[in-house]
């Protein structure tokens, strides 16, 4: 019974760690998308300037 409780606690801890990791990765993804969008906008503006 104790081993099962230890296993449950370990799994809950792992779940919390993975949820935190997913939140961090989601933030990185949002920042990368924003950066890519800005880079594309700058490239489009440069293209318009050259025309």
Image (tube, rainbow, N blue to C red):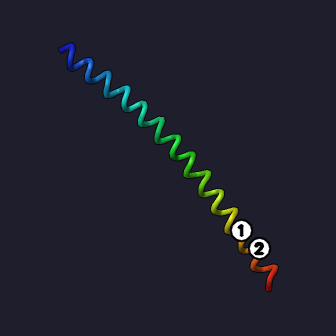
As drawn, the label of residue 41 is: 1
Whole-percent x, y for residue 5 in the image: 25, 18
Q: Is residue 22 left or right of residue 10?
A: right
Task: Please rate how many residues cluster around mark 2, counting C-alpha atoms within 10 Å: few if below 14, some from 14 to 19, many from 20.
Answer: few
Q: Nearer the viewer, residue 25 or 12?
A: 25
Measuring 44% from the left and 36% from the top, which residue is drawn there?
19
Q: Is residue 10 left or right of residue 44?
A: left
Q: How many marks?
A: 2
Measuring 31% from the left and 28% from the top, which residue is drawn there?
11
Whole-percent x, y for residue 2 in the image: 21, 13
Whole-percent x, y for residue 8 in the image: 28, 23
Q: Is residue 50 above or below residue 32?
A: below
Measuring 36% from the left and 30% from the top, which residue is drawn there?
14
Give yes or no for contact between labels 2 and 1 (Cβ–Cβ under 8 Å): yes
Q: Specify the farthest residue to the bottom.
A: 51
**Quadrant of the frame with the C terminus:** bottom right
Q: CA distance from mark 2 to mark 1?
A: 6 Å
Q: Specify the farthest residue to the right.
A: 49
Residue 41, image quadrant: bottom right
**Quadrant of the frame with the N terminus:** top left
Q: Specify the farthest residue to the left.
A: 1
Q: Kindly state the secondary structure of the residue where label 2 is placed.
A: helix
Q: Is residue 32 above or below residue 16?
A: below
Task: Please rate how many residues cluster around mark 1, counting C-alpha atoms within 10 Å: few if below 14, some from 14 to 19, many from 20.
Answer: few
Measuring 75% from the left and 79% from the top, which residue is drawn there?
47
Q: Kindly state the secondary structure of the residue where label 1 is placed.
A: helix
**Residue bearing the label numbered 2:** 45
As drawn, the label of residue 30 is: none
Q: Is residue 27 above or below residue 35?
A: above
């Amino acid at each position: 019974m104790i081993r099962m409780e230890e296993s449950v606690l370990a799994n809950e801890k792992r779940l919390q760690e993975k949820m935190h990791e997913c939140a961090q990765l989601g933030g990185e993804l949002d920042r990368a998308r924003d950066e890519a969008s800005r880079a594309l906008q700058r490239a489009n503006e440069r293209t318009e300037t050259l025309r």
